Image: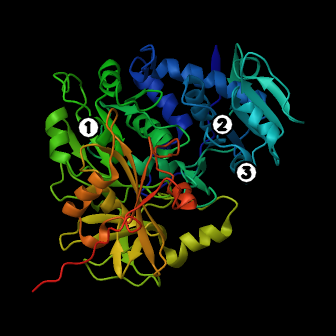
Amino acid sequence: MFTADPMPEGRPIHDHRIPPRDVIITRAALDRLAAQQPDKVFVKFDDNLEEWTYAGFRELVLQTAAGLQQQGVGQGDMVLVWLPNNREHIRIMFALNYIGAVYVPVNTAYRGGLLEHVVKLSDARLAIVHAELAPRLAEVKTARLEKVIVQADEARPIGNLQVARYADTLLPEAGTVAAPARTIEPWDPLAIVFTSGTTGPSKAVLMSYLQLYSNAGPETWPFVDGEDRYLINAPMFHIGGMGPMYVMFARGGSFALIDRFDTATYWQSVQRTGATTAFLLGVMATFLEKQPPSPTDRDHGLKKVIIVPVSPELEAFRNRFGVDIYTIFNMTEVSSPCVSDANPTRRGTCGKVRDGVEVRLVDENDCEVPPGEVGEMIVRTDRPWAMNSGYYNNAEATAKAWRNGWFHTGDAFRVDEDGYYYFVDRTKDAIRRRGENISSLELEGLILKHPSILECAIIGVPSEYGEDDVMAILAPVAGKELDVEEVLGFMRDSLPYFMVPRYIRLMKELPKTPSAKVLKSDLRKEGVTPDTWDREAAGIHIRSERLA
């Protein structure tokens, strides 16, 4: 049996922009929800359809929280969590927040220099680690880390670190969870989430309770409510994995957890778990759309799908699977500044600016660009603490991103006369070829119309003529083979001359982060490889047509 001391009362918050503490603070909200709706399902697992009710989940959280406190974890402490999506990971995330500690999830793919970088950046003294990942810690400098709790049958030595088993430390038989030294406030840090590191060293995004609530909360995503069950397939070290757990919790709703996205079993998972809403990266939607049609395509309860970026074949996807489609613009550092209505009709849009957010599109000097022109999106919110609280232990990056009082996203957009925003590219991914600006995102979408191409990454490579040449890295649909000259013919027929890639490289699949983002930085480093086909070396030159 576990009990919890009441949290100290804080000063009243009179700002109408900030919800009550028992809506957004984990400790207060879980106590309230477990009392109000004890038998409502909060989590459903796809592997064996186990369910956790709110009351049952609170008991699990209290047990883990008591164990953490017995290990010396207190309010404000950073704790590294290096686990896959599993039951223990969910308990640990909520238990850390229940005692006011800071949840710091780590990418399960990290090793070597990247691992050493995030361990040092976090300032954590304790790490909770999966058995198969633990040996990697012995290969790096571990900074301030002192103790590792391993999810394993036995605790094997890891360098000079103290090592203990999860079962011996975080699963006490009884206890009382002590109150934090002071009330947990909405602006306190809930988590540190590391950026993907696809364009440079990972930065540690300091995220408050208010930011995670605002990220996709009730007023931000009004199309999701407390009766929904959100299907989560993204890893918990990614905002797409941890975020939906919290925002469904803030609604008193539920979520279903699957191990990872799998094209072949996705719809069966939707049906088994009773999911009503889900998030899909654009590439995932493409994978599903390119599966052979089936009489069971609508045998599921999914009603709403958020697709980012929205598929060019939105209407076909909607009609085939019988769902309403929404799209957004979001990133770890912000809180969904742009959200669409259901089934947007303007191709390529990510919606309009939501209430409570200001957005500007600016040039390199932070001067606004005219409507229709491309500029970097910068953002600020009306609600305090509704976006990141800076990059932890990186004052220089924080100052650069927050210059002039606006957060700089690093993403290029344009806006039309009706206020619809269109993502053009990461500012680092834009390609300049022979005086023409090329959006890698737009070009990828056009090439993916080829029925045998499953994945496409467009990068710029240095040209002997200055600026860039365009390179396409392609992977085929399962069971299909690609022929570079046939693919080139398709591109010549469907693309402007200046967008037709000079280089084409074929791969079985593209390299990705665990959050399914293509590792363009790796592809750029590799550049023109020996297996890359160069059409100009093959004597094929494509130029503009001369009009009479």
Q: Vertical placement of 533 versus 243: above or below? A: below
Residue drawn at x 84%, y 39% as measured from the top left:
146
Q: Which residue is mark 2?
A: 81
Question: Which callout, 2 or 1, points to the residue nearer the camera?
Answer: 1
Quarter-of-image position of residue 150 = top right
Q: Could you tell me if residue 15 is visible in this image?
A: yes
Q: Which residue is mark 3?
A: 113
Q: CA distance from mark 3 to mark 2?
A: 18 Å
Residue 90 x %, y %: 55, 29
Q: Could you tell me if residue 218 is visible in this image?
A: no
Count neighbours of disc 3 (C-alpha within 10 A) and say few if under 14, some if 14 to 19, many if 20 or more.
few
> Which comes sooner in the sequence, label 3 or label 2?
2
The kind of secondary structure element at disc 1 is loop
Residue 523 x %, y %: 52, 56
The kind of secondary structure element at disc 2 is strand
Q: Which residue is mark 1?
A: 290
